[in-house]
Image (cartoon, helix red, strand yellow):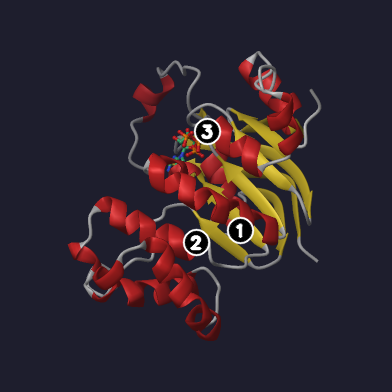
Amino acid sequence: MVSIEVRNASVDFPIFDAKTRSLKKLVLGKVGGKIGTQAKVPIIEALQDITISLKEGDRVALVGHNGAGKSTLLRLLSGIYEPTVGTAQINGKIAPVFDLAVGMDPEISGLENIMIRGLFLGMTRKEMEKRVDDISAFTELGDYLHLPLRTYSTGMRVRLALGVVTSIDPEILLLDEGIGAVDAAFMSKARDRLVDLVRRSGMLVFASHSDDLLFELCNTAIWMDEGRVKMQGSLREVLTAYKGRDPFEHMSPETLERLGEKA
Ligand SMILES: Nc1ncnc2c1ncn2[C@@H]1O[C@H](COP(=O)(O)OP(=O)(O)OP(=O)(O)O)[C@@H](O)[C@H]1O
């Protein structure tokens, strides 16, 4: 059974090379985690006292200002970071998609990169062999797929990476917003695959500043602020509080219906 249970978890980053005195003088703005200066070594309290319980079928949007702790939370959920205090229990096969470029090797061909990246995301070689034709067709890269990745443009790399990412079958899909920064024309093509991917994954946690993608993919939301959970609830409730207005307000009844919202 897929589930995530985080109890009173905090993540600190000690800054060993910082000058304590100048840090103490810092007045923090609205952006970024809290800087603790009580200990000998200054620490950034990136996450504080996080308690989250997620179950199969949850599609969670992570929202919050820059530095609020969204990426750190995703890394905690993926097991990359251990909590400094508290616990994080994750049951399920995780696919962390934080950076489309991670796991790509510039010296090997596009086709080989498709395999490697799939294995990195938790697929078996057999599963990837079945998918490679479909991914190749989606990328529209043709003969380029036999050339080393270093000969690709940025957009071509994104096509390849997105093709692989949207072909996997994860139990827990953790997405960081980089994927929103894709060329608009290709994104509209990738969108259907992304929606499909999210449908067949057991759980999604998606950190993004893009309302459109959040509407499309998520049903609940967590608002992070200065390393803490400020609010949890339905996507509409949380976005309305976070933005100070209802982002669904001016949508057509058809769009609202498609998104499963009431007018
Ligand atoms: N490796 C690290 N070392 C030190 N501090 C870090 C590290 N990673 C994150 N932080 C700090 O933790 C806090 C939370 O950062 P995080 O990247 O999780 O924010 P975010 O909500 O994802 O921001 P954004 O929307 O800008 O991507 C910030 O104050 C950041 O400076």
Amino acid, disc 2: Val
Distance, label 1 to label 3, CA atoms, is 18 Å
Q: Residue at x 62, y 18 (%)?
A: 243
Q: Which residue is mark 1?
A: 197
Q: Residue at x 22, y 73 (%)?
A: 147
Please tell me the numbered disc located at residue 210.
3
Q: Which tag, 2 or 1, sits closer to the chain's start?
A: 2
SS for tag 3?
A: loop
Amino acid, disc 3: Ser
Mark 1 and mark 3 in contact? Answer it, CB < 8 Å.
no
Residue 50 can be seen in this image:
yes
Q: Is ligand 1 less than 8 Å from the beta carbon at label 2? A: no
Quadrant of the image for the C terminus?
top right
From the viewer's perspective, is residue 182 above or below residue 39? below
SS for tag 1?
A: helix
* Frontmost residue, 180 versus 62: 180
x then y, percent, for residue 59: 70, 47
Q: Which residue is mark 2?
A: 165
* Frontmost residue, 151 versus 78: 151
Q: Residues within 10 Å of mark 3 (few under 14, many from 20)?
A: few
Amino acid, disc 1: Leu
Q: Quadrant of residue 198?
A: bottom right
